[in-house]
Image (tube, grey):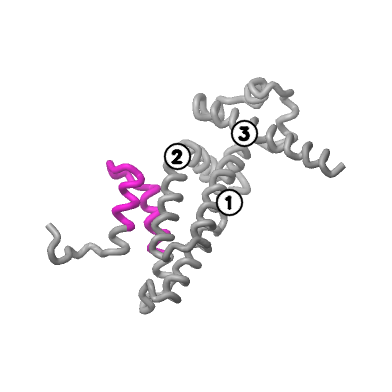
Amino acid sequence: MLVEMNRREKKKLQTKKTIAEIALTLYFKKGLNETTVAEIMEKAALGTGTFYNYFESKEAILKYCLAERIDKASQTCEDIQSSMLNSTQKLTQILQVIGKTHDENRQLISLYMKFYHNSDKVNREPPHGNRFMEILSNIILEGRTKNEFRKDIPPEIINEMFSGILKTTMSSDLKLSFMDNINFKYSLLLEGVIKREGEV
């Protein structure tokens, strides 16, 4: 009986993922408002009414898809946090993961933010919560405990600067690739802007 339930739950989850990915493909091609529930379900080979067994609206698919991708990135970041790397290496790798996730999902994030900023919508909280901030805080505290980071600067300041790198890169209009942009800023955070002796 339990095996049967698990099988049923897995099938429901797979159906939900299929509907979401088909919808996302249509959104990217035609736009969210121009895509109908009937179109989505026709491509999924399911009845139109079945859609509402899985999602309350077309917009809800954006939140679901973005949350899935962020959950995957969060899990990777948690694995990095518990690894044997030193704190600077952990921060570097986490920055790469977050940057790559953002870079690969620009269209989805853009669509989600259009919905998120629409004042007519409710329940507009971003789906990732504070997971990334908690991971960053823990690594910064670990770096201070192990004497890898300065102790004369409050950890909240370091965390805020690190978060600032992500936010400014995501909203940047500079003609740089996303990863180049984020790497330059991270280098400035770690090494400063003052030219060191011997540098050309």
Number of residues whose C-alpha sits closer than 10 Å to that of mark 2, classed few (under 14), some (14–19) or many (20 or more): few
User: Which residue is at a point 53% across and 63% down the rendered structure image?
Assistant: 134
- The amino acid on which the numbered mark 1 sits, given as a three-letter code, is Glu
Residue 196: image quadrant is: bottom left
Task: Please say if 9 is above or below 98.
Answer: above
> Which residue is identified by label 3?
20
Task: Please say if 118 is above or below 32.
Answer: below
Residue 86: image quadrant is: bottom left
Tell me the quarter of the image containing the N terminus. top right
Front position among marks 2 and 1: 2
- The amino acid on which the numbered mark 3 sits, given as a three-letter code, is Ala
In magenta stretch: residue 172: yes
In front here: 177 or 200?
200
Q: Considering only order in the chain, which callout, 2 or 3, is on the residue closer to the N terminus? A: 3
- The amino acid on which the numbered mark 2 sits, given as a three-letter code, is Glu
Front position among marks 3 and 2: 2
User: Which residue is at a point 45% across and 76% down the rendered structure image?
Assistant: 145
Q: Considering only order in the chain, which callout, 1 or 2, is on the residue closer to the N terminus? A: 2
> Which residue is identified by label 2?
104
Mark 1 lies on a secondary structure that is loop
Gap between marks 2 and 1, in whole Å?
Answer: 21 Å
Number of residues whose C-alpha sits closer than 10 Å to that of mark 1, classed few (under 14), some (14–19) or many (20 or more): few
Tell me the quarter of the image containing the C terminus. bottom left
The range drawn in magenta is 160-186
> Which residue is identified by label 1?
125
In magenta stretch: residue 30: no
- 8 lies left or right of 35: right
Residue 110 rendering spot, x and y as whole percentages: 47, 39
Front position among marks 3 and 1: 3
In front here: 175 or 83?
83
